Amino acid sequence: MNTGTSEAISRAARTAVDAAIWAPSIHNTQPWSFALSGDEISLRADPDRKLRLADAAGRQMLVSCGAALFTVRIALRAQGCEPEVRLLPDPERPLLLATVRVRPGAPPDEHTRLLHAEVERRRTHRSGFTALSVPERLIEALVAEAAAEAAHLTPVRADAAVRVLASLTGAAQAVQGEDRPRRLEIMRWARPPDSGRRDGVPAAAYPAEPRRTYPEHFAQRDYAGSRQWGGETDDRLSSATGLVAVLTTPGDLPADWLAAGQALQRVLLHGSAYGLSVAFHTQALEMEELREFIRRHVCSGEHPQTIMRLGFVLDELASVRRTSSEVLDDDG
């Protein structure tokens, strides 16, 4: 590899890390770090950012890191590079989740450019949607995107199943809301108004008061608690439940969690390109007995990795991310 090519590869790798910081993560914890060494990017989990009560096994942490990994891949392909990925390459270093070697590749196709353009535009939604339905062709495309990453996105069509998921979400939220240690864990990631922090959930990113969605209500996280935080939403225009869907994997090991995260980001970026927003409801999946019930009775035996609502909104708020220098180790 000549010097010019080597320098181009290094620039592409750094640009991919710059993109990866925009990946979604549970409560915007951003539980990842990266290292650059020549033509290789290493992705590591950051256990200091794991939810120790809600995510004791680290499943949601790895789903989040999987989303960052897909973002690295799409950012490299958008620059005409080919990522060579090794998942969990060293059993003795379980926090090393993946290595990505950057190779020369083909110019990006239209689909790659479409997804890459949404990396910084995509936002997580935390309220109701407009009454506009998600087009069937878009749903089919999202299902195909998840399948491309060895995961399954299943739209929940049956009213009874939607009611079950809504009820279990509400039950889990009620139980967790009475658990003081869990409330404190959530509060760690709730940013006060005008906070200068570059992680966590901004105060304006959720309604100041709980908002019902119709026809089925999915309980939202209580980030504000007794504090007068939160933004305002117009219930007359944004109160629809939207399309409920579950992302599942056949297995339930770290490699499956990483696959789920890659599938999730692929779905989110494709949806964002067509104006679609997504709200997440993982409360019930943080209680193993409820997660097992959902696996057996809603997901046909597959392992649920996230529950979401999809729909259209009138506007979206800005997001916050740490800078790449805060998450990157460079060997020079």
Image: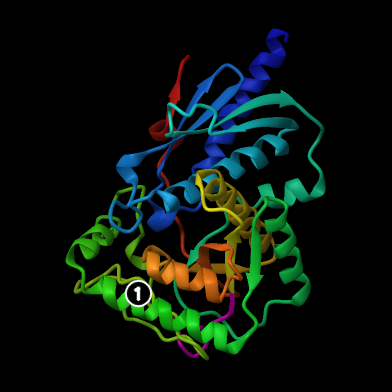
Q: Residue at x 47, y 85 (%)?
A: 213
Q: Nearer the viewer, residue 303 or 15?
A: 303
Taking 127 as reference, is 248 above or below it? above
Q: Residues within 10 Å of mark 1 (few under 14, many from 20)?
A: some
Q: Position of residue 279 (x, y in %)?
A: 50, 69
**Where is residue 14, by image quadrant?**
top right
Q: Number of labelled discs?
A: 1
**Where is residue 276, by image quadrant?**
bottom right
Residue 239 in the magenta stretch? The answer is yes
Q: Which residue is drawn at 35% across and 80% down?
A: 171
Q: Which of 75 and 88 is in front in this view?
A: 88
Taking 59 as reference, is 36 above or below it? above
Q: Nearer the viewer, residue 290 or 235?
A: 290
Q: What's the magenta bit mostly, secondary-structure-wise? A: loop
Query: Is 38 placed left or right of 216 in the picture?
Result: right
Residue type (three-letter) at the residue carrying disc 1 = Ala
Q: What stretch is highlighted in magenta?
A: 234-244
Q: Residue at x 30, y 56 (%)?
A: 189
Task: Say which quadrant the N terminus sits in.
Answer: top right
Residue 63 in the magenta stretch? The answer is no
Residue 214 shows in the view: yes
Say which element carries label 1.
Answer: helix
Q: Which residue is drawn at 59% across and 35% down?
A: 16
Q: Residue furthest top?
A: 2
The residue to which callout 1 is attached is: 172
